[in-house]
Image: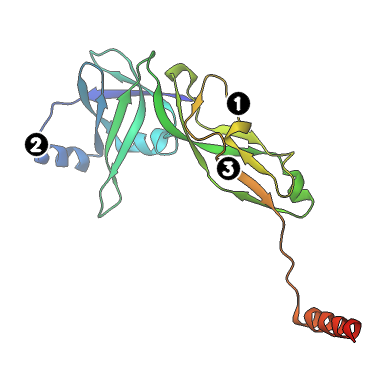
Amino acid sequence: MKEINLKVEKRVIGNKKHIKRLREYGYTPCIVYGKNKNIHFFLDSYLIEKKIKNNTLSKFIVSITNERNITTMLKEIQYNPMTEQIWHLDFLELNPIKYITYEVPIKPIGRAKGVRKGGEYISKIRKLKIKALPKNMVDHIEINIENLDIGEFFTVKNIHPPKIVILHNSNTVISAVKPIKTIETPKESKASKAKNHEVIN
């Protein structure tokens, strides 16, 4: 999993007027939920757009003045319902010996055999709920679908990621290749009926 360093400034918990002023000057209030204490800080809104918004499944090393470096992951992004501006960020401190539960996207690799034969590839689920120790966390899970034929399914039991626990039933279908139905044209239908009529007579 990608690691991103964030150098931030600790903030004193202020009233709504103080927080509003922070936002007006281009800063976003944040918090790290930690084991021993919660730490409030603020980030430059430009930094959020550049480093965080498109890297939500990353480890963030939060460096705060007079504090130790804290390894975190993004827990929640809160938006202003009127402007859709990012309003607040919640980070969760990662305990190196404690499993973390989160969702990751599934990334299919290759072209299914059944698609090459004319079938249609269908994704049943696009994300997996998993748990892992911080050192083993990943930002996606790859599945090789090259041998998936028409009428076959790719299930959770076909995945064997090292040091990661998938929190789905082993028979959960991830994807499948289904045959493409042929649509009979009115002309073909009429000709077919005529042929059948001749055989009956």
Occupied quadrant, residue 50: top left
Of residues 84 and 142, the one drawn nearer to the viewer in this rendering: 142
Residue 105 image offset from top left, x and y in percent: 51, 38
Q: Secondary structure at mark 1?
A: loop
Q: Please tell me which residue is depicted at 81% across the width and 79% down the height of the picture.
A: 188
Q: Amino acid at mark 3?
A: Val
Q: Give the alpha-carbon distance from disc 3 to disc 2, as whole Å.
A: 49 Å
Q: Are marks 1 and 2 in contact (CB under 8 Å)?
A: no
Q: Give the alpha-carbon distance from disc 1 to disc 3, as whole Å.
A: 15 Å
First in sequence, mark 3 or 2: give its number. 2
Q: Amino acid at mark 2?
A: Asn
Which of the labelled discs sits on residue 15, or is there none? 2
Occupied quadrant, residue 31: top left
Residue 176 image offset from top left, x and y in percent: 65, 47
Quadrant containing the C terminus is bottom right
Q: Amino acid at mark 1?
A: His
Is 68 left or right of 188, judged from the image as shown? left
Q: Give the alpha-carbon distance from disc 1 to disc 2, as whole Å.
A: 50 Å
Which of the labelled discs sits on residue 173, or is there none? 3
Which of the labelled discs sits on residue 192, or is there none? none
Residue 101 image offset from top left, x and y in percent: 40, 28
Q: Secondary structure at mark 2?
A: loop
Q: Please tell me which residue is depicted at 68% across the width and 49% down the height of the picture.
A: 177
Residue receiving disc 1 = 160
Which callout, 1 or 2, points to the residue nearer the camera?
1
First in sequence, mark 1 or 3: give its number. 1
